[in-house]
Image (tube, helix red, strand yellow):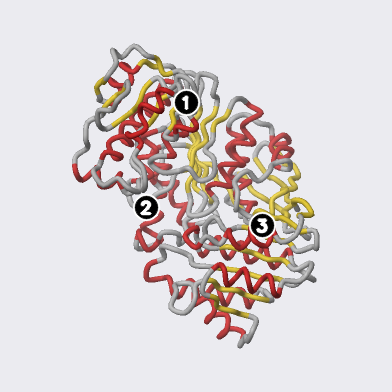
């Protein structure tokens, strides 16, 4: 963050100094966890499910914070922000568990205002903001973009999927006078959310990956999802760049909704930046020719799954726009690493059992991609798909889960373990597989993760390949972690 006094912060966020004359300067990071505070930092007091950050204000200052951003008076130097109108407070409170009185919503709004001020100030100098959205692949693509831009100058990107009303401004406030690139994910639970995030840190380059079924239960339809995802290209300035996946018709149509120059990415001839001659090796790692207006170059992605080709094309388009030669883009794509945990994290045990831990989250599109990766990696080996609920699908839930079960059969997956039990939203996966393939023991419905772990420990054999995937609420990473804890690891595959 840039250095600001508490008085300056109060003016920016519409608050008032408390227990201070306003002269202390914030020179460190902005944090909502006292354990992460650095000297001269700003502590953001937020309510939680079990504790309220306001109760730790004095502790934060004793630990070196210059002050506190708070919704009520505390026993420490602070900027106290006013409450929000009830409607706006409720909307923002959805992002915070435990915000029963709207105090957290008021602090989030102040945090957003502070981030907007800092990003606007830095953008006058040399900061380029890159925003990424889509129904799936946001985090992986954000990680790829960051790795391609880091050689060009200091780059800030969020850890994992820190992409909502809290994570977005928190990440933006990691940028300082030296930062050249700020790479941000933008997520949404409803219309207007992406536009609001884009207003916090206005992007010059916007990437839209796809429009899928994730959150269709909240939005009502894929068309409604597309309307919201399109808020990112709408937010771009006339001198900006919209990187759009033109293989997805709903994304390609967003070209009509932006003032920015459009760069299409994909496999088809309409793409400006495209992949040709895509091939997968025995570990489902893709090789292809990167084809651009500036020339061509070979890429060999070290990431598992053909779905990463589209993510890599989007990242390549961003790097090309910021001046990286195509040969260097290809070279750097061939050297990237997975940065965020539980996203196609491939580890092989000492006995040859390979675990594909893709358990961070799930929607129909990402599960289909993961199953195809499993099928590709398990040729000649026994394959297991351990799957759980895909959340927020609304009226489409039964059909979507049923289709995934049938796909497992069509891809010739050897064993399917559905975690959730009778009557759970995940159960139609088991029934779909059974009806598609007249399976017997090939598909098993278990009540919970403990039952899944017990079954796998009893039946998994050396050299088997096991995929674990579900929405995060299912906590299926416990299955992957249990499998990997059973024997010494042979190393990252």
Q: Distance between the residues labelled 2 and 1?
A: 28 Å
Q: Where is residue 283 in the image (x, y as percent from the top left)?
A: 75, 58
Residue beneath the point at 57% across and 51% down: 270
Disc 1: CA contacts within 10 A as few (<14), some (14-19) or many (>=20): many
In this rendering, the label closer to the viewer, 2 or 3: 2
The residue where tag 1 is placed is 29
**Quarter location, residue 467:** bottom right
Viewer-side label of 1, 3: 1
Find disc 2 in the rendering and name its residue.
189
Residue drawn at the location 52% of the way across and 35% of the way down: 183
- Left or right, residue 278 beside residue 420: right
* Gap between marks 1 and 3 measured at Cα: 38 Å
The relative height of residue 421 versus residue 362 in the rendered view (above or below) is below
Looking at the rendered structure, the secondary structure element under dot 3 is loop
Q: Residues within 10 Å of mark 2 (few under 14, many from 20)?
A: some
User: Could you say which disc has been placed on residue 325 in the image?
Assistant: none
State the image coordinates of residue 187 (x, y, percent, origin top left). Answer: 43, 47
Looking at the rendered structure, which numbered label has been put on residue 306?
Answer: 3
Nearer the N terminus, badge 2 or badge 1? 1
Indicate the position of residue 141 as horizontal and vertical percent values.
58, 45
Q: Earlier in the sequence, mark 1 or mark 3?
A: 1
Q: Which quadrant holds residue 412?
A: bottom right
Please tell me whether residue 99 is drawn above or below residue 172 in the rendered image.
below
Name the residue located 37 percent from the left edge and 52 percent from the top edge: 189
- Image quadrant assignment for residue 322: top right
Q: Label 2, secondary structure: give it.
A: loop
Judge left or right: residue 104 versus residue 254.
left
Tell me: 482 left or right of 78.
Answer: right
């Amino acid at each position: 963050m840039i250095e600001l006094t508490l008085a300056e912060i109060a003016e920016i966020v519409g608050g008032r100094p408390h227990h201070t004359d306003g002269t202390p300067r914030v020179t460190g990071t902005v944090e909502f966890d006292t354990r992460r505070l650095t000297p001269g930092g700003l502590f953001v007091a937020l309510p939680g499910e079990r504790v309220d950050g306001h109760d730790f204000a004095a502790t934060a200052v004793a630990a070196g914070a210059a002050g506190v951003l708070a919704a009520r008076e505390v026993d420490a130097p602070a900027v106290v922000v006013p409450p929000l109108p009830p409607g706006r407070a409720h909307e923002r409170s959805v992002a915070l568990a435990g915000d029963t009185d709207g105090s957290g919503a008021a602090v989030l709004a102040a945090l957003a205002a502070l981030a907007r001020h800092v990003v606007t100030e830095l953008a006058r100098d040399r900061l380029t903001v890159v925003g990424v959205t889509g129904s799936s692949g946001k985090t992986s693509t954000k990680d790829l973009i960051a790795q391609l831009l880091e050689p060009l100058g200091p780059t800030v990107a969020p850890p994992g999927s820190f992409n909502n009303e809290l994570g977005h401004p928190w990440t933006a406030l990691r940028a300082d006078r030296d930062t050249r690139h700020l790479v941000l994910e933008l997520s949404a639970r409803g219309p207007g959310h992406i536009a609001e995030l884009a207003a916090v840190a206005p992007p010059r380059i916007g990437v839209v990956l796809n429009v899928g079924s994730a959150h269709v239960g909240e939005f009502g339809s894929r068309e409604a999802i597309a309307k919201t995802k399109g808020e990112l290209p709408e937010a771009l300035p006339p001198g900006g760049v919209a990187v759009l996946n033109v293989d997805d018709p709903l994304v390609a149509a967003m070209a009509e909704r932006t003032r920015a120059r459009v760069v299409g990415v994909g496999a088809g001839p309409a793409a400006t930046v495209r992949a040709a001659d895509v091939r997968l090796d025995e570990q489902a790692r893709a090789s292809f020719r990167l084809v651009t207006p500036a020339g061509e170059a070979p890429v060999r992605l070290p990431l598992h799954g053909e779905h990463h080709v589209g993510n890599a094309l989007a990242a390549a388009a961003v790097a090309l726009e910021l001046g990286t030669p195509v040969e260097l883009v290809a070279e750097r794509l061939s050297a990237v690493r997975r940065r965020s945990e539980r996203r196609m994290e491939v580890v092989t045990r000492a006995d040859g059992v390979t675990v594909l831990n893709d358990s961070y989250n799930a929607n129909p599109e990402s599960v289909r991609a993961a199953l195809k990766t499993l099928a590709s990696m398990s040729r000649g080996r026994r394959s297991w798909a351990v799957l759980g609920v895909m959340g927020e699908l609304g009226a489409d839930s039964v059909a979507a889960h049923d289709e995934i079960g049938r796909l497992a059969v069509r891809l010739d997956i050897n064993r399917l373990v559905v975690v959730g039990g009778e009557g759970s939203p995940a159960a139609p996966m088991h029934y779909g597989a059974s009806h598609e393939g007249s399976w017997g023991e090939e598909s098993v419905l278990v009540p919970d993760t403990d039952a899944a772990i017990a079954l796998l420990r009893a039946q998994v054999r050396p050299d088997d390949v096991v995929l674990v995937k579900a929405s995060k609420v299912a906590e299926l990473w416990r299955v992957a972690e249990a499998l990997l804890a059973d024997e010494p690891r042979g190393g990252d595959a």
